[in-house]
Image (tube, rainbow, N blue to C red):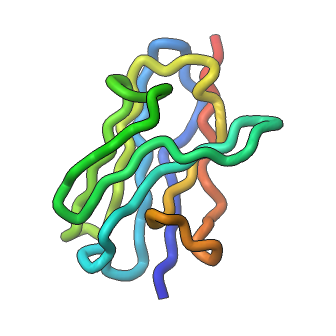
Amino acid sequence: QVQLVESGGGLVQPGGSLRLSCAVSGSISSINAMGWYRQAPGKPREWIASITSEGRTIYTDAVKARFAISRDNAKNTVYLQMNSLRPDDTAVYYCNLIPPGPRYWGQGTQVTVSS
């Protein structure tokens, strides 16, 4: 059974960068697509980025050109490099499959962008 553990969040100033990691307990090589999602205070959880097993990526407009998703099948890890962070990026960030599996939601990792 696949388990997902997110890490790498924290407090960062506007314009700063963070790199999130999603460690997968099982093998991700057989998983077609994985993604990152986020939930800001008072808002529903939203999808922000996906990567297929072939490495094709897609992003929501709000993060395009600032965030980069990648995966390392050998390490069973998915990453989210976040640059030029803005206060409205403040949220709990989660990884999951595409489409998301309800039983795979983890605790997420908090990202706070504030001066």
* Residue 2 image position (x, y, % from top left): 47, 81
* Residue 34 image position (x, y, % from top left): 39, 61
Report whether 13 appears left or right of 41.
Answer: left
Q: Give the residue displayed 41% in from the left and 71% down from the top.
A: 24
Q: Give the residue displayed 43% in from the left and 59% down from the top.
A: 22
Q: Give the residue displayed 42% in from the left and 17% down from the top.
A: 84
Compared with 10, 95 (above or below) is below
| Residue furthest to the bottom | 1
Who is closer to the viewer here, 2 or 101?
101
Q: Quadrant of residue 110?
A: top right
Compared with 15, 66 (above or below) is below
* Residue 45 image position (x, y, % from top left): 67, 47
Who is closer to the viewer here, 30 or 81?
30
Q: Quadrant of residue 88?
A: top right
Compared with 106, 49 (above or below) is above
Q: Quadrant of residue 105?
A: bottom right
Report whether 109 appears left or right of 56.
Answer: right
Name the quarter where the C terminus is drawn. Answer: top right
Who is closer to the viewer here, 59 or 83?
59
Report whether 64 appears left or right of 12.
Answer: left
Q: Give the residue displayed 50% in from the left and 63% down from the top.
A: 96
* Residue 53 image position (x, y, % from top left): 23, 65
Q: Number of labelled discs?
A: 0
Report whether 50 appears left or right of 90.
Answer: left
